[in-house]
Image: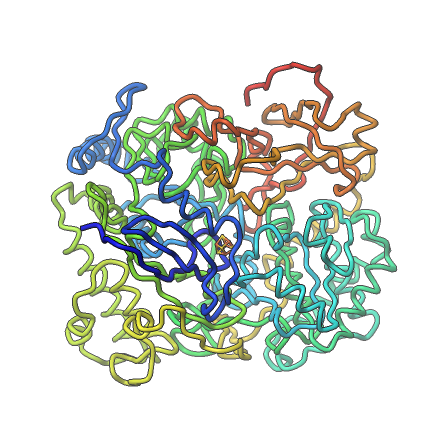
Amino acid sequence: MPQSGSRVAYRTCPLCEATCGLELHLDGDEITLVRGDRDDVFSHGYLCPKGTALKALESDPDRIRSPQIRRGDTWSDASWDDAFAEIERGLTPIIEQHGRDAVALYIGNPNAHNLAGLIYNRVLIQSLGSSNIYSASTVDQMPKQVSAGLMFGAALSVPVPDVDRTDYLLMLGANPFASNGSLLTAPDLPGRLRALRGRGGKLVVVDPRRSKTAEEADEHLFIRPGTDAHFLFAIVHTLFADGLIDLGTVADHVDGVAEIQRLAQDFPPEAVAATCGIDAATIRRTAHELAGASRAAVYARIGTCTQEFGTLASWLVDVCNVLSGNLDREGGAMFAKPATGGANTGGEPGKGRGVRFGRRHSRVRGLPEFFGELPVVCMAEEIDTPGDGQVRGLITVAGNPVLSTPDAGRLDRALGSLDFMVSVDIYRNETTRHANVILPAEGALAKGHYDLALYSLAVRNVANYSPPLTDLAPGQMPEWEVLLRLAAIAGGQGTEADPAALDDFVVAGLVDKAVRRAHSNVEGRESAELMATLGKRRGPDRVLDFMLRTGPYGDGFGADPSGLSLDVLEANPHGVDLGPLQPRVPDVLRTPSGKIELAPEPCVGDVDRLRTSLDRATGNGALVLIGRRDLRSNNSWMHNLDVLVRGKDRCTLHVHPDDAARLGLTSGARARLASTTGTIDAVVEVTDAIMPGVVSLPHGWGHDVDGVDMAVAGDHPGVNSNVLADGTLFDPLSGNAVLNGIPIRVEALEAGAGIAAG
Ligand code: SF4
C-alpha cells in the first residue's frame, strides 16, 4: 500500500561511489525534496547535483515499469509470467542446441551500487555456466584489481589514499571534482582535497587535461596519454638513484625490492621525459617531494587504467607507495576494513591463495579471463564470428555496452544479429532496444541499499544501511527475484522455480561455508541455528545481515553482543562510524608467500613492452583521443534527466588552440573524427585546458538512435565516442580496453555537414 502524508527519511545515494547520505522529504511515496544528510557519519551533509536528481530519476516517465516484449519493431507491456515464459522459449533452445557458452552475460556499472545485483548476479553467473561473462570492469578498473591481486592477494585489496590525514597527494588520471572519487570512496572528496591544502599539504595532479581538479591543485603536470607507467618508473628510478628508499613499517613484509631496482635502471627521468612530456628535473623533484613529505600517497584512476599500460601503471602506483614508506601508514595509502568482510578479512590472516588468471580463454582471439570474466573487447567478435561456441543469446543487467565499450558500431550490429536477448534495465536504451524482453528493476526507494563493494575502498571505515522506504509499486518485482528467476531459467529449472526456495538455498550455502571455514567467527556452529537466527528477512537483506554478523565487526550470532548486525544498522539511520583506517599489514595480505609481492611475474614480464615504447616517435602531429568526466553526467545512464543535461552542451570535442589552428577548427564548428573502427562528427570546443596533440570527448553519449525510448536524452544526443575505440587495443595484463590514447584523425567539416554513422 502506498504511504500517505509527509515524512523525512535517510538514505545513502546509490548513484556513484561516494555513498553520500541523503535526507529525503516524501509526500506519500513521492520524493518532494532531496538534501544532504547533515548527520550522516561519512558525508556530513554533502551532495552533488546528481544526488538531487534522484527525485527526477524516480519519477522519469520514460522508465520501464513493467516487463516489455518486442515483436519485430513493436514493444508491448507484458505480465511477469508471460515475460519469463518468453525468455524460457528464447534462451533454452540456444543452450540445449549450442551449449552454455552460446549465451553471454554483460553486467553494467550500476550493479556496483546495487545490493541485489552484487549478490544475485553471482547466482545468475553460476546457473548460466557460460564462459562468456562480461562486465564494465574491463572498460574501467580491471588493471587496478589485477595489480592489487598480484601484489596483495585479492582483487579488492586496493590501497586508498588516507586523504584526510595526508600531507602530499600525487594524483594521476583522476578528476574527483567531477567524479567525486573512484576506487576511492570519500563523500565530498573535493572538500577533503581542499582541506588537505588548507592544512599546508600539497596536491599534484598529473593529467593530459587541466581538469577542474587540476585547476584546484597546487601543481598540474600535463602528461601524454598512456605514459603514466613511464613517469612512475622514473619516480621509482629516482627513489633508488638518490637514496630515498624507505619501506617504513612494511619493510619486513615486502618481497622483490632488488628486482624493482634492476627494472627501474632503464627508466631514468631523462629517458622518459620526451615520452611523457614532463621534463626530467620535474620528475626528479616530484620523487623527492613524495619521499620527503611526512605523510604522502600516490593515487591513480581511470585515465591510468584505460590505456595500453594500465596494469603496469596501476602496479607502479603502489610500488611508489611502498618504496616511499607510505603504504599502510596513517596519511599514506591504506586498506579499508569493510564491515561485511571480504577476501582480505576471511580465512587465515596474512596468507592466502593469491589470484590466478587465464583459467579459460575467449574463443576467437584467445584472450584470458580475469576474475571470472572475459575482456569486453571480445564481446562483439564472439557474437558475430560463426563457429562452434558462437554467442547467440545475451543477458544484460543494468548495462549499455553499445555506448560504453569499444568498437561500438560493430557491437551494435552484432546485437542486432542475436537469436535472443533479455535485459534487466530501467530504460529502453541503445543496447536494450535490441532485447526481445526487458525486465524492469523496482524503484530505488522500494529496496534496501548497502554499498557492499564500495566500503572496501573507503577512506574511513563506515557502515550504513538504507531500508526500503516504499512498497513495491503495482506490477513491480524485486530485482533479486527477477535475477533468481532468470538464474532458474538459465540453469534449466524453468519458470516454475520458487525464488523464495532458491533464496533459501543461496543463504544456506553461505552459512554452511562460514561454519566450515577456519578463523570464521561462526566456525563449528550449527548451520540450522544460524539460519533460524536470521529470521524473517529474505533476499539481499538477509544475506547482508549474515555478512555483517560474520564480518570483522560482527556479532558472530551472539558471540559478541556489541557487534554489528542489520538490526544495529537499522537503528542507526545516519550510519555507524567504525573509525579511521588502521594499519593492516601483514594481516590484510592473501598472497601465497604472505608477503607484499612488489615484483609479480606478470608485471615484470611486461616491462620489456614498456621499455620498447620509449622509442616511439612523439610530437609528429598525430592526435590521440581521451575521454573526460562531467559532474552532471554518470557514464551513459543519467542523460534522460533534464535537470542534469540542460544548459551547455557537454559532449564537445576539446582541441588545443595550436591543433585547432593547424586543422582549421573553431569553437562551435563541427569536426569529423576517424579512427580504425569508425567515424563520427562532433562539435569543437577550442581550449588550452587540453595539451597539444590530444583531443577529448566524453563517453556515454550518442542517443539519437532508432528504437531508443528516452525523450530527454534524444533531445541532447551527443555522439558515441566508443565508435572510435578500437577493440584490438587493450592492456594485455588485464584485458582492459584502451579508451585513452586512441589514435585519431580530425578534420574540419563544412558548415551544415551531417553526422556520419558509426
Ligand atoms: S557525489 Fe555521488 S553519492 Fe554523492 S550525491 Fe553525488 S552522485 Fe550521490
Q: Quadrant of residue 449?
A: bottom left
Q: Nearer the viewer, residue 339 or 210?
A: 210
Q: Is residue 390 visible?
A: no
Can residue 534 be seen in this snapshot? yes
Q: Position of residue 286 (x, y in %)?
A: 79, 64
- Could you tell me which residue is drawn at 75 percent across and 69 percent down? 290
| Quarter that holds the C terminus | top right
Q: Quadrant of residue 658?
A: top right
Closer-to-camera residue (310/655) = 655
Residue at image position (56%, 42%) is 737
Residue at figure coordinates x 38%, y 43% from the top left: 398
Which x, y percent locates residue 600?
59, 63
User: How far across and down, in percent of the image, does residue 59 sit?
Assistant: 36, 41
Q: Is residue 100 above or below residue 679?
A: below
135 w.r.t. 294: above or below? above
Pick the residue in front: 47 or 237: 47
> Is 374 above or below relative to 754?
below
Residue shown at the point (46%, 46%) measured from the top left: 53
Q: Residue furthest left?
A: 496
Compared across the picture, whether 608 is left or right of 288 comes to left
Which image quadrant for residue 726? Answer: top right
Drawn side of residue 309 relative to residue 55, left or right: right
Q: Nearer the viewer, residue 15 or 609?
A: 15
